[in-house]
Image (spheres, rainbow, N blue to C red):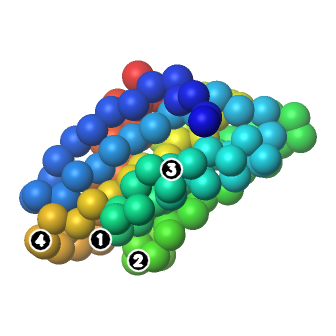
């Protein structure tokens, strides 16, 4: 099982957002962690993530079914603003029945990422 450096949870309009911080050096570690989270959170609506690796330099943002640009990109943006590298932030979302809209999603994913990065 993958060990996460930090975990946080926030709630927005009955949706739960669980943030996980992974210290990683390569894409394989990201894939292993994602597989572990999918197994652990089988009923989650979305598992969005973004990572920034230093060597070789590689960044990726994944919305996992959320409207384009409302999840992965905000996660990556916070990683970049904090100057973090060799990290991946995963955000597991359990839909609470109330739509947040694009702005609400961006705010929620940004908030949980900021908290998990400290």
- What residue is shown at x 17% (from left), y 47% (from top)? 11
Q: Are marks 3 and 2 in contact (CB under 8 Å)?
A: no
Quick one: label 2, few (<14), some, or many (20+) residues within 10 Å?
A: few
Residue position for label 3: 37
Above/below status of 34 relative to 54: below
User: SS for tag 1?
Assistant: helix
Where residue 45 sits, quadrant-wise, is bottom left
User: SS for tag 3?
Assistant: helix
Q: Position of residue 39 (x, y in %)?
A: 50, 55
Viewer-proximal residue among 26 and 42: 42
Viewer-proximal residue among 1 and 50: 1
User: SS for tag 4?
Assistant: loop
Q: Are marks 3 and 1 in contact (CB under 8 Å)?
A: no
Q: Earlier in the sequence, mark 3 or mark 4?
A: 3
Q: Position of residue 41 (x, y in %)?
A: 40, 55
Q: Earlier in the sequence, mark 4 or mark 2?
A: 2
Q: Position of residue 94 (x, y in %)?
A: 27, 60
Residue position for label 4: 98
Residue position for label 2: 67
In space, the residues marked 3 and 2 are separated at their CA atoms by 21 Å
Q: Earlier in the sequence, mark 3 or mark 2?
A: 3
Q: Are marks 3 and 4 in contact (CB under 8 Å)?
A: no
Q: Are marks 2 and 1 in contact (CB under 8 Å)?
A: yes
- What residue is shown at x 50% (from left), y 57% (from top)? 38
- What residue is shown at x 39% (from left), y 41% (from top)? 19
């Amino acid at each position: 099982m993958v060990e996460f450096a930090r975990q946080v949870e926030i709630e927005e309009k009955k949706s739960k957002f669980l943030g996980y911080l992974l210290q990683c050096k390569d894409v394989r570690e990201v894939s292993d962690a994602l597989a572990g989270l999918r197994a652990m959170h089988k009923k989650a609506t979305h598992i969005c993530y973004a990572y920034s690796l230093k060597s070789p330099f590689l960044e990726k943002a994944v919305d996992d079914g959320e409207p384009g640009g409302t999840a992965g990109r905000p996660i990556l943006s916070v990683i970049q603003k904090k100057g973090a590298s060799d990290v991946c932030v995963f955000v597991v979302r359990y839909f609470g029945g109330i739509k947040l809209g694009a702005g609400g999603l961006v705010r929620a994913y940004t908030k949980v990422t900021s908290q998990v990065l400290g």
